[in-house]
Amino acid sequence: MQWEMIRSCTSQSFNRFSNLSIVALWNSNIRSTVSEGLSYNALLLFRQMKQSGLEPDNLTFPFVAKACAKLSNLNYSKIIHSHVVKSPFGSDIFVQSAMVNMYIKCGELDSACCLFEEMPEKDVASCNTIIMGFAQSGLLGRVSKLFCQMRLMEFKPDSITLIALTQLSSNTTNLNVARAVHCFGIQLGVSDDVSVANTLIAAYAKCNDLSSAEGVFNGISLGMKTVVSWNSMISGCAHLEESAEAIGFYQLMCQNGVKSDVSTFLSLLSSCVQPEALLIGKALHSHAVQTGCDLDISVINTLISMYSKCGDIDSAHYLFNTMYERTCVSWTAMISGYAEKGNLDGALSLFYDMEATGEKPDLVTVVALLSACGQTGALETGRWINLYAISAGLRGNVVVCNALIDMYAKCGSMKDAHELFQTMPERTIITWTTMIAGYALNGESTEALDFFSQMMKLGLKPNHITFLAVLQACSHAGFLEKGWKNFNLMTKVYKISLRLEHYACMADLLGRAGKLNEALDFILKMPVRPDCGVWGALLGACQIHQDIEIGKYVASRLFELEPEAAVSYVAMANIYAAEGKWDGVAKIRSTMKCKKVRKFPGSSHIQVNGNTHVFTVEDRCHPEELLIYRVLDGLALQLKESRLRLSSEDIIAYDL
């Protein structure tokens, strides 16, 4: 039916434009078909054209190559290339440039490069095509070589060249490259081009330099700013999870009469990842409804993710249930929502429903489930997911293996984690960091530091997360000297910017070692404002060493930062109680009542036959309550009898 429709449209075109070249009419039909996104139909038209005895010209092949590029189909691309080689246009620069782009879009960079090198004639456009291809893959060395080659051929770089180089800095998150490209663009006189500026905004944001991104954005005149300009700036804020800044730019965008699109809402919603951003997320949802963007499936998926991350899982599930069409991303977003809350049963139930509908889970789905297993300590379920990943052919993926190692470590099975690590054919810095963090988490600090040494010997460059795991290992074991050594290694040798988590580790390490005054001095000299994590680490040390004076000062800072957090009040009350200062305890309790601070009870998770059971302090709501507490009472009685028996044996031994 589809073939007849194409034939009919072609016949009508021929009748209407009989005075035009027949080949030109075929070209026009192929081009319009590709433009409409019907790339496969364009290839069918090309085949029909050949079957009718007509020979393509130098305009036909670029259109067909574009269709292959959109399909990213290597087999089709090779067939078209063979037709080009047999035609008189094998050396045509326009056709060859299209072939280079076709291979790039199919991921065949080496083939594209060979074809580019063999071109008898090159121009700026062909150079830009190959540079863009390697830049999008983040291959800095190859791009540098190609760019030098372009300059040697005395081709003057243009705005497209600069966009390609900017994308390279974005993909490699190399701020120095971004700044160098920006300077080069100013020298060329193309930095004022709005497309170049938009790309620079995105690059600076990816390199975590939001101020430079904003500087470029402000440099674009108001009349030249497009929706892409605004989206680039909003996306940059979202990338750094700066929801307030993203909303600010969105408000300015609306005030300037620029109409938002789907990309605008995708960026805005992705910036709302904390519970305090829920109201903003709901307001954005309302705006999306008003503009009609809420009907886009990508926006719905992002809304589900936003509600889940902000803690409103019910709203996320409501949206999910009202969807007419669900993709793998939709299911995974909902499963991830339950996984982030530690609701393994809910995540697994959705996973089974997903499979029942015929939707195939991908590696992101598996990683989300493994995360839930790690949070709840569900080792057996994690092992089952491991087997599922093997059967689904996902175990060969390094991301899945890293998630499995993390799950095993959090479930306390470093033996399983190490065995998996040993069998991995490919190990990334994340793999090594996950192992180091796993050993640190399980109190095996010596093994963690040994792994770090092995990693360094292999020449792998640690990142800020690696050093955080190393410092945690030192902190748990009380290795003060090694902690300082690695802290200095991070800052002075690797020039890695310190984050609040690193400061918290060092404060904790100093505090555990009993050097409370030194820890306080360390915190007060920090170049950034300490957060609750940093002060909390020192308060914990004050509780261990029962230091009331420093504890009072630290607690006062915590009360200012988080007046409704119960942890700080409880810790300070315990410090008073340990010293018998009951008036201090009473004062803390009175303050908590006055400020309406609530202490939420801790909980334990136990898995039985694949079902998770949650228990909290003084919780008597379990269906098997009578049986559970009967067994517990029996165990308590046995323990008491054992103690009495041991005491009697001690007395007899003493008498003898």
Image: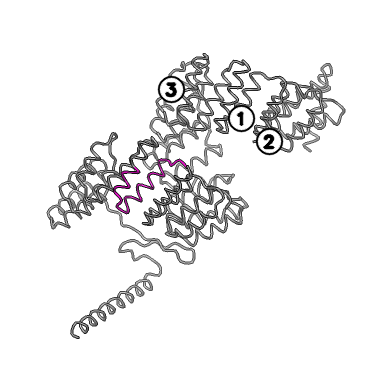
Which residue sits at x=25%, y=79%? 644
> Residue 651 location in percent, x, y?
20, 82
Contact (Cβ within 8 Å) of mark 1 with mark 3:
no
The answer to whether residue 50 is left or right of residue 462 is right
Magenta: main secondary structure equals helix
Residue at label 1? 133
The three-letter amino acid code for the residue at tag 2 is: Leu
Residue type, label 3: Gln
User: In the drawing, does residue 412 fall left or right of residue 484?
Assistant: right
| Rendered image: mark on residue 393 | none
Q: Marks 2 and 3, Cα distance to the nearest angstrom? A: 40 Å
Please report the bounds of the magenta region as a residue range. Answer: 460-486
Q: Which residue is mark 3?
A: 255
Mark 1 against mark 3, which lies toward the viewer?
A: 1
User: In which quadrant will I find the N terminus?
Assistant: top right
Q: Is residue 392 magenta?
A: no
